[in-house]
Amino acid sequence: MRWSNYYLMTAREAPRDAEVTSHRLMARAGLLRRLAAGIYTMQPAGWRTLRKLMGNVRREMERAGAIELSMPAIQPAELWEESERWTKYGVELLRMEDRHGRRFCFGPTHEEVVTDLVRRDVKSYRQLPINLFQIQTKFRDEIRPRFGLMRGREFLMKDAYSFDADEEGLDRSYRAMHAAYSRIFEACGLEYSVVEADSGTIGGSSSHEFMVLADTGESAVASCAACGYGANVERAETGVLPVPAAGGAEAPREVSTPGTTTVAQVAELLEVEPAQVVKTLIYETDDGLAAVAIRGDREVNEVKLLNVLGGLGLRLATAEQVEAATGGPLGFSGPVGLPADVRLVVDESARALAGFVCGANSGDRHFASVRWDRDVASARPVEWVDVMTAVHGDPCPRCSGGELRLSRGIEVGHIFKLGTVYSEKMNCTFTDDSGRLQPMEMGCYGLGIGRTAAAAIEQGHDKDGIIWPKPLAPFTVVLSSLDPGDEAVNSAADTLYEELVGALAPGGFDVLYDDRAERPGVKFKDADLVGFPVRVVVGARSLASGGAEVSNRSDGEREVVALDEVAEDVVRRL
Ligand code: ATP
Ligand code: MG
């Protein structure tokens, strides 16, 4: 491809809304263009990158036994009502009506459609297992679309769905997808880790996320270097925390704590550690109010909490709601004497405390020397749960002596064991080998195409631009002719171009020939910005010194190579 005929316009400035490196560089390199919030046109060079990635993903899916199909983006509401997600999926689901008033959504994911397909076609254990995949456009009306392809509203996803006769089968399918994902991300040269994940609105029993480690990642990951445990902070557990000094042999007493609305103020006034204070937050759930008690020095993890409390969402109760339910003002709630109609869940971190301080459900009052068994659990039901947010330095939940580290990650892939959640609701059954009707065991496996490309840039760039991993570069080679007006240079460059195209990809080409009438400085800058892995430069000067100058984008070291050896040299570099 000659650049002079190609559609690739670079820009000096990034758009103002581009907050992260990958978005800035993709925009400046002319790979994408914003149409509306979270909605992008992939320009030709950017599309080449995505196409290469999709090719790789397709190969690995097929190698793992998955079969490609294409499902509609527009999906009827009735299917989503069967799975109970029409309301459950919430505001991210783009709902619409056709001219007859029939309701549809633009698919954010395809469990419903694929389950409907398979329940019609597959009847017997002899037809299982099956794994179907597609690469297709999804729409999710994200609250905060940002970071370009990283969190779009319209985006490309590879999604695969496995159907098995039993749990062992599901295990095998899941492991095959796990291995395929690892191969895909390794082939892209990405540094990633696989962590335990929350199963979210999709539902199901177990799931893992593939995280590309990067400071700009929107996910937080807790991991243990000693044993390899890793989990999204949304679900990370911790080992048992060291317990502060015990007390509480004496009877609980009510103390005056005027004006203390934070744990720090209470702890200071009563001369105890914040860890000896139990903080109690009141939440509004789908079925009334719930009180959550946790150690004063720790934070509630709302993803874990929602899993415990159930329902579609949570929000902190208002001051009026707290007052009406507990009899005390906001900031002074506590488990002692809490009315029985407020559900009480207590984090394990607080359970270990004896003789703690807590709010007295009365203005400017706290209790001290409280014990769970004597003062709370004897009077009302208590649920002991894990709803704590893990922090850096916490003990590892899996090994002894290990410590959790927190880092940022970009979630590029997510694999779930769904079990029979969808097959039961949607009646996707088969006859087993003894003639009984059984629900199929399902798994689902998502991989963000655009997000993976963006993650590759977050990991591969320098001040001048993108440093693509070879398999994702829009073109693997840029051939820059520095003096297109010079006959000798022109003819040498033309010959090189023909040779390179032939050498690299018989029947195709992967060379962008920069024959534009631009200054050398512009060509160099553009080549670095777009990030072609190998650059070949021909000019009057290089010819005088014996040939063409060849360099890798990754280190920039230039080498003069005789013209008739350039193709061979480039093949070697790739
Ligand atoms: P997130 O927590 O980042 O919103 P998710 O858990 O909603 O992700 P899944 O439903 O598991 O994501 O989707 C599978 C994959 O699709 C993700 O691993 C990610 O690579 C990609 N993906 C999800 N949402 C987006 C988005 N808004 N823009 C681009 N890619 C996305
Ligand atoms: Mg999401």
Image: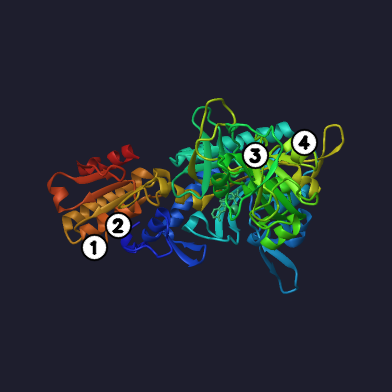
Q: How far apart are marks 2 and 4 (CA)?
A: 56 Å
Q: Do the residues labelled 2 and 1 touch (CB within 8 Å)?
A: yes
Residue annotated with mark 4: 126
Q: Distance between the residues labelled 2 and 3?
A: 64 Å
Residue annotated with mark 2: 526
Residue annotated with mark 1: 518
Name the N-terminal-most of marks 2 and 4. Answer: 4
The kind of residue tagged 4 is Arg
Residue 199: in sight, yes or no? no
The kind of residue tagged 2 is Asp
Q: Closest to the observer: 473 or 35? A: 35
The kind of residue tagged 3 is Phe
Residue annotated with mark 3: 356
Left or right: where does residue 305 sit relative to residue 339? left
Q: Do the residues labelled 3 and 4 touch (CB within 8 Å)?
A: no
Q: Quadrant of residue 210?
A: top right
Instruction: Find residue 206 and report its horizontal and vertical position in percent.
Output: 66, 39
